[in-house]
Image (spheres, grey):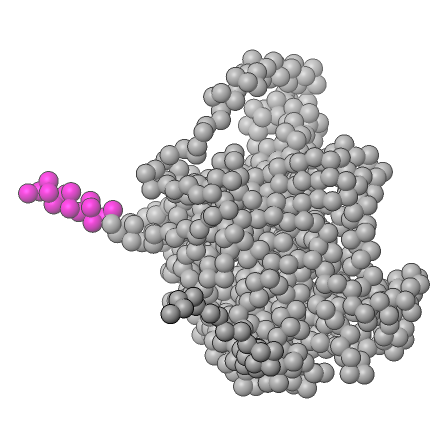
Amino acid sequence: MNTTESVAELSPADQKIMNEFLEEHQLFFGPDFNQMQNHRLEARTARENEAISKVNDPHLLNQVRGRIQSSLAESFRMIEQMGAAPGAKWGDLVAGIFTASGDLSECSPWGMATFSAVCQYPIKFCNKYWTNDPSVGLKDGDGFIHNDPRYGGIHATDQSMMMPVFHEGELVCWVSSTIHEGENGACEPGGMPARAESKYDEGLKMSPLRVVENYQIKRDVLTFLQNSVRDPKLQYEDVKVKMFAVMRTLDRVRSIINEFGVDALIAFLRRNLEDTETEIRRRLSEMPDGIVRFPSWADSSLREPCLIKLNMELHKKGDRATLSIKGSSPQMSNRAINNVVASTKSFLLTGIIMQVWPDLPRNQAIISTFDFESDYPSMMDCDYDATLSMSISSAFHYLIKPGQLFNKLLYSVPLEAKSRIIPAVAAQYNQPATFIYGGLTQHMEVTGNFCADINGAGQGARENRDGLHSISGCFSFMSDTGEQELLEEELPMVRLVAQTLAKDRMGFGKYRGGAGYEQMMSSKGTAMWGFMTGQTGSSFSSCPGLFGGYSSSAYPICRVKGINVFEWLKKPGNTERFPFDIVELMNKQPIEGGVYTADDAGITFELTTEGEIYMICQGGGGGYGDVLERDPELVMQDLLEDLVSHQVATDLYKVVYDKATLRVDPAATKQARDAERKARMARGKPYKEFVKTWTKPTPPENIPYYGSWGDNSVIYAGVGESRITMPSDKMHPVFMPDPREVQMAKLKARIAELEGKGK
């Protein structure tokens, strides 16, 4: 008997039948792993070659560029003026145009390039899976909606509308619009649930889905979407707004075709990408070769305190560079701060545009030029089962990292070089410092969303001047923080303090960072309302200084519970007693009977009662250079504008002056600064001695630590005896205990201890 097993080989005809069967009966069109990992441009098509051979006049292509930029700007303004979501009103949106293959060629001059950069993935998904599917297909007048970051995106609050553009039956490009909608039916209102422990807690998750057919919204699909969220009218209005904005872009594209020809459009969309890649390589060649590193840490998972490493290195040689995030924290599968790698890359793209080369076209070539390295599954390159709803908390670190890395290389490059487009800039504040809210409004309507204070972060100091105060979000320039009166008309929220620049809470240096602002929020006129926040950085600053500049402050969230401030203010004399300043209110505690707390900046959704006070501070930017080199007159100006205290001016900047007149004593100031420099030298140690006491072989045992420690190939996770280590190339996800169960176990143990003592 022959025991050798034989493997049957199918004939070509049978193999064809089997392949067709498997293709026709695919169980689930989940995210395409290879697509989502690939940030490169698609290969130039034969049609693009043909168009470029016909239209290669740079002046003509520049005319096309101008028309496209104008059309995208027009669509942006349409959304901003008509959108219902707070994000639409305050600039958290974008419009974009893509090649027929799905590469982002240009996005609107305002708004979030990040949004458009991730739209290439769902468009490429549609191209690959829906084009030839007989039940779907791509037709003129189709519109696809999408919000699941596993198919491309940031987090589920961002909804995109994408339309294919046809000319005489030929697919020539795609156009899109994206808005941060907010409410999406997640387990906590507002769309960004920090309490989410699985992707099934995140609410509405739309794979690329046709919601428009023949330029008409499919009402059955829209009804399903409305039925899935807390605010159905917002969902209805903004689907229409995005559709009409995209249709306006589409009309403008057709007018470009009518005026310049379809070949001019196709040639521009491709050349815009290839020229950008060429220019980036030229600029890279001007920079010195080397490796620069910039690790940063988050101090919370938004559920419990821990130290989470978010690593970054730039390897540059010749005209090529590699962005590496190896050594970062492992994936925390049941915490909401993970990111799919496509999202991480889009944040890096945005950081390069905003902080390094803002003159370049805002397109996919910005990131496609770079090689990329990461560990999988890590927090910044997670699998598709991890929770992503508050991904921005960790991903925002990667908006500031390009600026810090490139500045270290560009510092030695002459200012007239093309690679030095802007001065070196310290880190802008990079956390989502805002209130997310939800409940029943004073108008008896259920809602949930977020405030636009996220758009008011302080700018980092520059190499030649101070940073600007509360300029924008680190993810978007020309965004807005909204109108207080409008917010209070629509929602049961009252700001007791609104957008007051925060004293002493920016990064100090030769040039100081721009200040953030503080606010005090309360609710009124509803019996069902609550708040949550989603930032880290209450114990460990997330916004470092540059070249000796100080980091910005750490920012906890403060609360006064168990009181009604509106009733308290009615009592005689209390209006004068109320300190409109967070630090003063927390230290003086003038409201009798209140419970005053200062906690981690990230809190899950909690119900509040009328008149309780929630306080938050938008962060300031990092400082630049040595504080002892700051012009004493600039310190006096900061005192005059109430940006810093006398203690900072004397103890930190070492300026000697008359406190009544703010007149500087130059000789005494020089003497004080010379003395401080000598004191620094006395405190200093030779590098070899310093390293012996400073560096430790492993992370401190008492700190829950996640990520590498010196060696990027070894990853740590956990605390004390429960800490594990793993090779980075064999990393596995980490699951965290429920903080409520941990607290319950402690309380039960304490009860048992007390009962034992009683017996």
Predominant SS of the magenta segment: helix
Q: Nearer the viewer, residue 667 or 382?
A: 382
Residue 404: name its quadrant: top right
Is 146 on the left-hand or right-hand side of 59?
A: left
Quadrant of the drawing holding the N terminus: bottom left
Q: Where is residue 392 in the image (x, y as percent from the top left)?
A: 55, 54
Is 209 on the left-hand or right-hand side of 759?
A: right
Above/below status of 341 relative to 219: above
Q: Position of residue 658 (x, y in %)?
A: 63, 23
Above/below status of 433 relative to 264: above
Q: Is residue 758 magenta?
A: yes
Above/below status of 737 relative to 512: below
Q: What stretch is highlighted in magenta?
A: 746-759
Q: Where is residue 217 in the image (x, y as percent from the top left)?
A: 62, 83
What residue do we see at 70% from left, 49% from top?
Answer: 370
Residue 67 visible from this viewpoint? no
Q: Where is residue 361 in the image (x, y as percent from the top left)?
A: 78, 56
Most extreme residue toward the front, as rendered?
Answer: 1
Q: Does the magenta stretch include residue 369?
A: no
What residue do we see at 78% from left, 47% from top?
Answer: 281
Residue 367 visible from this viewpoint? yes
What residue do we see at 72% from left, 72% from top?
Answer: 174
Most extreme residue toward the left, as rendered?
Answer: 759
How many marks can you see? 0
What residue do we see at 55% from left, 76% from top?
Answer: 10
Q: Nearer the viewer, residue 100 or 158?
A: 100
Is 415 on the left-hand or right-hand side of 306?
A: right
Is 450 on the left-hand or right-hand side of 303?
A: right
Residue 759: name its quadrant: top left
